[in-house]
Image (spheres, rainbow, N blue to C red):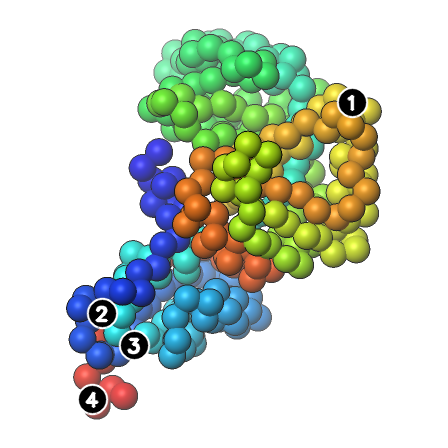
Amino acid sequence: MKKLTILLGLILIFSCGNLFHNEKHDITYAFVNAQDVSDSEKQTTVKVIQKRLSKYLRNVEVRLNSNDEIVVTLDSGFDVEGVNQVVENQGKLDFWPCAKSDKIISFILEADKVIANDSVTKPLSSLVQGMAYDGLPTFSVKDTIQVRKILNNEKVQNLYFDEFKDLKFLFGLPNDGYVELYGLESNQKERAPVNDSHIIEARQDYDQIGRPAISLKMNEYGGHKWYQMTNDAYLNQTKIAITLNDIVYSAPSVSSGPITVGSSQISGSFTLEQAIDLSNVLSSQQMIPKLKFTSLKKLEEEDL
């Protein structure tokens, strides 16, 4: 939970002028799997990060260096961890149709059968700690690495091309040391029917019980696909998983018919500050490749 909180704690501190004293600093980030990132994607990443950080800080410059790394140049008065959290958040937002819980249980039982003779791998069902109120299996957070290993087992993978075609598994947010496993109706493109590319506005809001949330407005195409998804969920009595960076934040049901307007809301375990900052990340309207912090450098006069 702490790791996820840090990931989403996009809180920039503007009052920490004593942290650095009227100096310029370069923060450098490398592309993870840089060989898979095109030149155009790198240039787009520069523009997206510039847009994100400009919402918080003045006099920020984002560029590519000679090693094709992202370099952010900032004046004094910034918090390194806060900047890292904004820059490293991919902003990958997806809306997936959910599989019914009985299909997920069937998959777990079939997975146990195909690995039954594997003396090294535990049965997947043996790791299930219980069933959530919505019928989804729950696992201990400490077992999630082992669960992923089983789901990625070559024999288990064959199930995805047979009776469980295009089924995709993602975990929800941890709660008291446990986490739900969601089954999503995926596709070969690995992007959801509605995703961050269809969002034209994201703003901090509150849900029906007063918790901080993020309201989203979609473009015309996204609104059309959203109508189709919510209509299918209504007719099939299934849910729609709202995921950020491949973590399920909420999975609402559609109880009163399809949604005819292109809008939605993400709620969950957000603080007010997290909801505000996350809405700013999503309002950049574009996911970016995965980045990792590599260095912080104080610029001397000769560097300026």
Lower sequence index among marks 1 and 2: 2
Q: Of residues 135 and 44, which is closer to you in this image?
A: 135
Could you give the CA–CA distance between mark 1 and mark 4, rounded to whole angstroms?
65 Å
Instruction: From the image, tell me which residue sits under label 1.
Output: 236
Q: Residue at image x 78%, y 22%? A: 236
Q: Which residue type does callout 1 highlight?
A: Asn
Lower sequence index among marks 4 and 3: 3
Please state the horizontal and vertical placement of residue 185, each as a whole percent of the image: 68, 31
On screen, residue 229 versus residue 33, left or right, reads right
Q: Residues within 10 Å of mark 2 (few under 14, many from 20)?
A: some
**The disc label shown at residue 17, or none:** 2
Q: Residues within 10 Å of mark 4 (few under 14, many from 20)?
A: few
On screen, residue 298 versus residue 65, left or right, reads left
**Circles 4, 3 touching at the beta carbon (< 8 Å):** no
Lower sequence index among marks 4 and 2: 2
Instruction: From the image, tell me which residue sits under label 4.
Output: 301
Q: Residue at image x 35%, y 23%? A: 177
Relative to residue 39, is residue 81 depicted above or below? above
At mark 3, the secondary structure is loop
One can see residue 295 in this view: no
Please state the horizontal and vertical placement of residue 49, each as a whole percent of the image: 47, 66
Could you give the CA–CA distance between mark 1 and mark 2, rounded to whole angstroms?
55 Å
Q: Residue at image x 52%, y 15%? A: 132
Residue 226 sits in which quadrant?
top right
Q: Residues within 10 Å of mark 1 (few under 14, many from 20)?
A: few
Instruction: From the image, tell me which residue sits under label 3.
Output: 75
Please state the horizontal and vertical placement of residue 303, each as a whole percent of the image: 25, 86
Relative to residue 90, is residue 183 depicted above or below? above
* Mark nearer the viewer, 1 or 2: 2
For the N terminus, the quadrant is top left
At mark 4, the secondary structure is helix
